[in-house]
Image: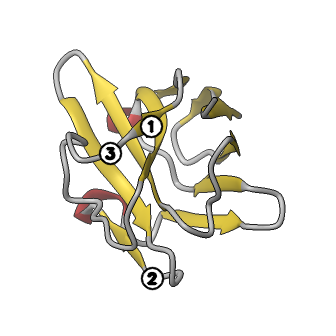
Amino acid sequence: QVQLEESGGGSVQAEGSLRLSCVVSGISTSTHCMAWFYQSPDKGREGVAAIRTDGTTQYRESVKGRFTISKDNGANTLYLQMNSLKPEDTAMYYCAARSSDYCTALSLGDEYNYWGQGTQVTVSS
């Protein structure tokens, strides 16, 4: 059984930081492309950052320079370090996995095979 479990969300003020974690079981982060998505009522679901099996990363333009995606294959865990948070970053954040070497952050997520339940991030001004 595949499970992706996010944690680390919360409420912060603008310019604050949060670190999201996604513990994966049932599949390996070393053989799956991993990504973070966010979803809010006004934005729908959008890709935020992705990391391919070779470690190559890709980011949505609006988070470049502020967010960093990483993974620990030994711990089978995906991370998202979020710095300089803005109110517009407020959303539910999901981790996702795709059974492929290739994936992109510029995605609505339809090609991803596995999803977590999400963790809420709220940024106040």
Residue 65 image-quadrant placement = bottom left
Give the residue at mark 3: 112
- State the residue at coordinates (27%, 61%): 60
Residue 16: mark: none
In the rendering, at what x and y percent does residue 55 appear? 53, 81
SS at badge 2:
loop
Q: 60 or 32: which is nearer to us?
A: 32
Q: Residues within 10 Å of mark 1 (few under 14, many from 20)?
A: some
Q: Judge whether 65 appears above or below 10 on screen.
A: below
- State the residue at coordinates (27%, 58%): 62
Residue 114: mark: 1
- Between disc 2 and disc 3, whose residue precedes? 2
Q: Judge whether 83 appears above or below 38 on screen.
A: below
- The amino acid type of the residue labelled 1 equals Tyr
Q: Disc 2, disc 1: CB below 8 Å? A: no
SS at badge 1:
strand
Q: CA distance from mark 2 to mark 1?
A: 20 Å
Give the residue at mark 2: 56
